[in-house]
Amino acid sequence: MTDALHYQTILELSSQIRSGDLSPLTLTEALLARIEALDGRLKSYATVMAESALAEARTAEVEIAAGRYLGPLHGIPIAVKDLCYTKGVRTMGGCAVLADHVPDFDATVVRRFRDAGAVLLGKLNLTEGAMAGYNPAFDVPENPWKESHWSGASSSGSGAATAAGLAFATLGSDTGGSIRHPAAACGTVGLKPTWGRVSRHGVLDLAQSLDHVGPLTRSSADAGIVMQAISGLDPDDPTTLVAPVPDMLAGLEAGVKGLRIGWDERYASEDIAPGFAAAIAAAVEVMAGLGAEIVEVSMPARLRDYLAAWGVLCTAEAADAHRATYPARAAEYGPWFREWLARGNAFSAADYAQANNLRAACVGAMRQTMRDIDLLACPSTARAAYPVTPEISYGPIPERDPWQTRFTVPMDYAGLPTISLPCGLSEQGLPLSLQFVGHPLAEPLLVQAGAAYESATEWHRMHPPGW
């Protein structure tokens, strides 16, 4: 545990910045120096935007001194996954075929960060096309808890940078788990929004009907602060929701007394390490001790069948997203993602329809599971970080077991919001992660529940050793 500047929360820093006790320029310089010193080893950044970050910090300092304080992100250094368009700065999506892609506008989420006064440090590394394997032309981010271990796949740079104190918040994207996976593997908080709560305009697609964009932070309050800034209707994205954006921090100190939390013990403990299962059960007991009512529920009986449909949907939609460059420039793709796109092109319309029907059945079954509860509790992932090699990271695709996605895919199918929270360490000293799942538009309640859990535990204050 540490009170070092780079590990402070946005909530802690923002009060110092607003009062004038902390300079945004000083804070930004400190983070850039830390990136310079450590990221050669961590490999979380694809592009560091030092010059523009310093300029934004100076502007924030002048604005705040003049009384034009914009809110808790004003002057706070953040970073975004390199799927998010940044005007005049290359956006590659982990793809060699996009190495020279320089957008002429900002993604809506980037613009909203700028509108909130945040300082953009740079763009973060990820898997190719935001799937699970990397292009050999790009670095694989290390897990700061243990090198040569899984760092969460797609949004791995976001998880690593947040955990190691190289940004105070980052953005990830979640199509099958890639806000929750890096949050879990790297020991951070991850808040996946309701599908449509956050605009995807200017964010490179993996699978449009499944993609979500959301924050990775080091506290639930910080996740709420970021979600507040990036959420809302966007005329440039017709899939965004018209529902107004509530105060994400309204219930920050309200606790969870009387909250009904669903618990399927078999689902939460089957086929995972005993120590991990025990940590999740203990976390649920913490919530009970805080006054929540734990309610027995059952996950969908046909869950295994439903999970198998995800690969068809994701490969087919990814092939559509990359139709301008695949198969015409197939040789520029890495072996992992090239095979993923080939699979997508091979499926028929009937295959896609059948998979979509299975998805719809899963969504309906999830509604039944959630009908009498406020939140569902379960692990964020099926296992803690595990050893990886370049051969695994770069492909070709290894044998996939859809059952390993049982804690993430159903929520992406249904577009349900989730929050992932550090809840322990494995026998190997690697982070374990608790997930709460909410009803549509329940992000404020997820922040509230996460903050309550954090008030009774210290796991979110643990940081990877050696950084």
Image (cartoon, rainbow, N blue to C red):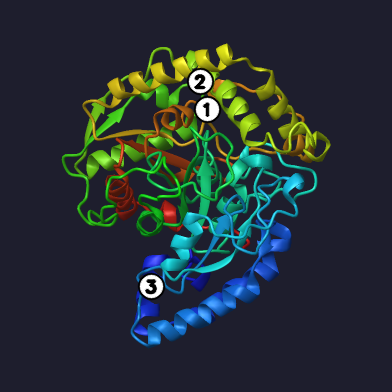
Mark 3 crowd level (few <14, some 14–19, many ≥20, 10 Å Cα)? many
Q: Tell which circle, 2 or 1, labels the residue nearer the N-terminal end.
A: 2
Disc 3 from disc 1: Cα separation = 37 Å
- Element assignment for label 2: helix
Q: Which residue is mark 3?
A: 14
> Is 379 or 341 nearer to us in this picture?
341
**Residue 464 image offset from top left, x and y in percent:** 57, 56
Q: Which residue is mark 1?
A: 405
For the C terminus, the quadrant is bottom right
**Residue 148 image offset from top left, x and y in percent:** 71, 45
Amino acid under label 3? Answer: Ser
284 w.r.t. 125: above or below = above
| Numbered label attached to residue 84 | none
163 w.r.t. 137: above or below = below
Q: Which residue is mark 2?
A: 307
Q: Residue at x 28, y 49 (%)?
A: 444
Amino acid under label 1? Answer: Thr
Amino acid under label 2? Answer: Leu
301 w.r.t. 413: above or below = above
> Is 225 or 398 nearer to us in this picture?
225
In this rendering, position of residue 53 left or right of residue 437: right
**Residue 202 image offset from top left, x and y in percent:** 54, 51
